[in-house]
Image (cartoon, coloured by chain):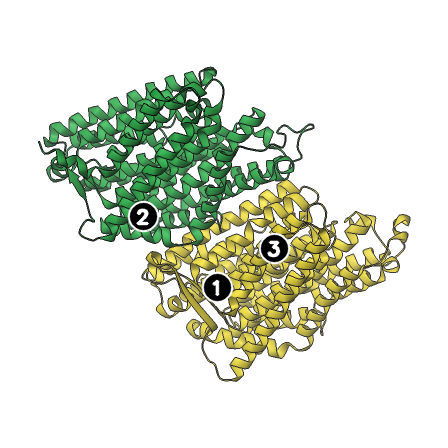
Chain colours: A green, B yellow
Amino acid sequence: MDFSQFLALHEEISLVAALVLLLVYDLFAPEKGRRHIPLVACLLLLAHTVFCACDFAASTGCPAAAGSRTAFAGMYDASQAALLFKNILNIGVLLVCLQACPFLRREDNGIKAGEFYFLLFSTLLGMYLMLSAGHFLLFFIGMETASIPMASLVAFDKHKTQSAEAGAKFILSSAFASGLSFFGLSLIYGGTGSLYFADIQSGLTATPLLLGGMVLLCSGLFFKISLVPYHLWAADVYEGAPTPVTTYLSVISKGAGVFALCLILTRAFPLFIEAWQTALYVLILLSITVGNLFALRQKNMKRFLAFSSISQAGYIVLGVFAASPAGLTALMYYIFVYILSNVAAFGVVQLVEQHAGRTDMAAYNGLYKTNPKLSVILMFALFSLAGIPPFAGFFSKFFIFAATAESGAYVLLLIALLNTVISLYYYLLVVKAMFILPPAEPADVPAFKSEAAPKFVLVVCTAGILLAGLVSCLYALIDRTVLLG
Amino acid sequence: MNFLSLFVLIPMLTVGLLFCLGKPSHIRLLCAGAGIALLALALTLLGLFIQARNGGATDAMLFRADLCWYAPWNIHYSVGVDGISVLMLLLSAIIVVTGVFASWHIDPMPKEYFLWYFLLSTGVFGFFISIDLFSMFMFYEIALIPMFLLIGIWGSGEKERAAMKLTLMLMGGSALLLLGLLGLYFFHGADSMNLLTLADRGMALDAQRRFFPFVFIGFGVLGALFPFHTWSPDGHASAPTAVSMLHAGVLMKLGGYGCFRVAITLMPEAATELSWIFLLLTGISVVYGAFSACVQTDLKYLNAYSSVSHCGLVLFALLMLNPTAMTGAVMQMLSHGLMTALFFALIGGIYGRTHTRDIRLMGGLMKVMPYLGVCYVIAGLASLGLPGLSGFVAEMTVFVGSFQEADLFHRVLTLVACTSIVITAVYILRVVGKLLYGPLQNPQHALLPDAAWYEKVATATLIAAILVVGLTPHWIADLIHESLAPVTAMLGR
């Protein structure tokens, strides 16, 4: 075997290196140094992020190196777009890692900080493999690597029974979803005799067996993306999991899931485009509408954001539905903006939870009086999620809608657009609570100063929300990369 | 970038500077300065525009600038003005600056108030200078959202419900609008979002039929098109004074302007074909609004319903699709913008003193506050169309233009709409009589002060503008007429 093939896996190698270094530091660091684990982990990830960004810049810089990078006889097949998407994920994970710092400084969690980051990085590694797979076995290894550590992260808060319950729910439904996927895969293997994306594409015939196989296979991913009706785990898990983990689940996991879905549908099943477009049509309609309607009634911020993220998932999948380069570009851009907005929203929720111990919406009444900056940031984040200009969310929604219109699905577009109005209603409810309603006496959430790390995350996210739309270079970069292949 | 972008940059800079200021007096000074700068800019633009036209510039849009923004979707930041947008910019500037004076002593949180206020104006000005579908839509939405907080925090009465209702209905309209705009883009060949390019291009008739209603209703919601007008009475009644002024005076014009600039200009055949449906709806707006105003007891509700009626007339005249009526529509936009702003400024002043807006609880105020009383009478007379004031020229032109459509349907509708003149006289005179004349209803009102200097500045400016429109309508009509020529040519008139 030619071991030099491993060298094609730049990002994966860099991430594994960071992971191993972290593990070694966790093992051998003196008692005093252990307190700095969050810092070390963030620095390692930062180095990894910078390395990936340089690598990406280098590969787009010289046209000869651009295009797909393959290894292991096509099992590993990373497109330029996947490479860029990994960079987007890196930024998101870095933000989540920084955001998790105060949570890990807590007395009972301090001892487990190393494990936390180790598990987090492992799921990221799993997602990398999913994104750059050219073969379903590698894809599955990636998907499982991304799911199983996730369950332990969800159950990380051992003093909260809800957290353990959420972990159990997550692992059970995750295992069931994987089972479905595997079953679907076995049908496809039976029908086509191969697990390579390219072979499946050429060997595909329109038999019910293969069609059923594709649907089952995708179910596993629908579960990860939490599209309705695969969403039932989401609200409970989001509520029970520690807030940084919830953030991670709602942005990184979901984003990677959608991109992977787009990858396998366009690479392995282009022949079934009508079938999967119909399926996605229904799923998008359901997710957007049901997610919105359930979000209307939520009284807990984390559950509220869970349902909001279900409906956001519906919007993101519109990019897959469009099945065009424009759709893929819009999708990647949407996910990037969604990462910034949702991390900012969860960042504020986490800080309020940390300092006042409350996650219910009533605690946000009159927040502007006690914590004006946090309220403004949360408002920006929610407006961005709702798609209000000049925030980046407006641009991302516009592009994804434009891609949908380009594919000609005007009815779907109309329903999606009307749903943005419903979603605006519940986002405005939170804004109303913060800015218009008077605070309780004494205030539920006292004025507080937050630590440097989460503050930094909020500042970065806010800057991103404000600039990512008005400055068009990011979208242009994604567009160029996607057209490159 | 050219000097037109200053219309967006000045409010944006003001928003930025407001962040750094703390003292209410500094804030007021900055806002007044910004407002006056905008007004000066608008007047300069008017001068330059007329000069350029006299100098022989015949382009549809002057002072154009273009900056590529999102190349994959052909989105540009592109600006340019014709006579109609110059007038609309002037109207907005007048109302923004008078609005600042009308909310001179806003409480609480003056800083936040003016932040949102100027963000709203950024959207308004941006909308009127844009000639690109995307930037137009973006500015349109920027103008909508600050209303929620402006009404929700500084409003009165059932402010939270009103704020939510207004925001959601207008956003619903903009959702329809976005669908229409995307349809326009893709069915025009998907290679330009520039209004002028699209207008030259033409669009297949069945696509026009499909998307015209979306665009027209999308903008029509903001122009108080029946039955989508219900946000307006609640919203205007609950909003603080300057916000009512800006909203009724300028934002509702965004609707009319958008219907003209996008719906009718880009889809002329569909406009001709489908105009009868919308004529019926706007006809209902005109008459229904006027009748509803007759039975109101709250001053602001009364004025809001009267706005529904008058703005209905704008859309009504646009849909007549002939040059005279359309000229009248634009004049009606100007006239209604000025007089409704004046009304709301005065009602704000009266409410600030008497703490009630219920007509039944007030009376004989003319003796107590003669300045405000006289201004109210002037506003009322302008509204019911007294010659010499703006309302007369506008409504006259509208009805003359509408009557030119010789078929039975248009004639009947015109006659029905004409009745609104009489009904307007009924409710205006009733209120003027009840509110200002007769015996003093509440003895405590006898001690109330008359207008302060900042209120006098605001109202005097508006009255001056109303007089200018009323006395010298010809140059305004010329400006409008020139800009209508390309559109009416396409409509085959």
Q: Position of residue B447 (x, y in %)?
A: 90, 52
Chain letter of mark 2 equals: A
Between B259 and A123, the residue placed more toward the observer is A123
What separation in Å lies between label 2 and label 1 (alpha carbons)? Answer: 26 Å
Q: Nearer the viewer, mark 3 or mark 1?
A: 3
Chain letter of mark 3 equals: B
Residue B17, label in figure: 3
Q: In which image quadrant can residue B76 be found?
A: bottom left
What separation in Å lies between label 3 and label 1 (alpha carbons)? Answer: 25 Å
Q: Is residue B171 above or below residue B389?
A: above
Between A132 and B386, the residue placed more toward the observer is A132
Please name the residue that numbered disc 1 is placed on: B130
Q: Position of residue B152 (x, y in %)?
A: 64, 43
Q: In which image quadrant can residue B327 be found?
A: bottom right
Q: Is residue B420 left or right of residue B349?
A: left
Please name the residue that numbered disc 2 is placed on: A329
**Which quadrant holds the N terminus of chain A?**
top left
